[in-house]
Amino acid sequence: MLETTKEAIKRDIDRLNEQQLKQIADFIAFIKFQTRFSQPTTDISQFANLYQEFAEEDRQLAETGISEYASLLNSEDTQ
């Protein structure tokens, strides 16, 4: 079906005058520009999966950080 659409568009373009061709060229440039700067849609479920994947590691890092912080505070108190 896509090939049929492409062929139909090519046939239609062959029948256009110069002014219409310029409008088509401008529209194509706009579509390319829009596509280049459009933001991809984000699947919210992806965030949930990533959160679950890294949650345990984050907890472990936080606990390690707290332990190190407490250790540093104790060493400052003994000085």
Image (cartoon, rainbow, N blue to C red):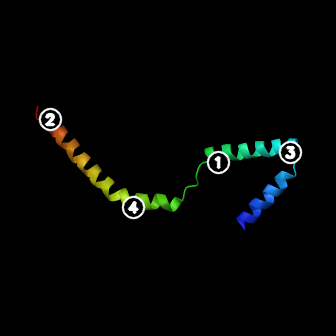
Nearer-the-camera pick, 10 or 65: 10
Which residue in the protein does label 4 denote?
52
In percent of the image, x 86 and y 45: which residue is there? 20
Q: Residue furthest bottom?
A: 1
Alpha carbon of mark 3 to alpha carbon of mark 1: how far? 23 Å
Work out whether residue 21 or residue 58 is closer to the camera in this orientation and state it. Answer: 21
Q: Nearer the viewer, mark 3 or mark 1?
A: 3
Which one is earlier in the sequence, the residue at label 3 or at label 4?
Answer: 3
Q: Residue at x 80, y 46 (%)?
A: 24
Q: Of the residues tagged 1 and 2, which is closer to the observer? A: 1
* Res. 54 image quadrant: bottom left
Q: Are marks 3 and 1 in contact (CB under 8 Å)?
A: no
Does the residue at mark 3 contact the one at mark 2 (Cβ under 8 Å)? no
Q: Residues within 10 Å of mark 2 (few under 14, many from 20)?
A: few
Residue farthest along the left direction in this orientation: 78
Mark 2 highlights which residue? 77
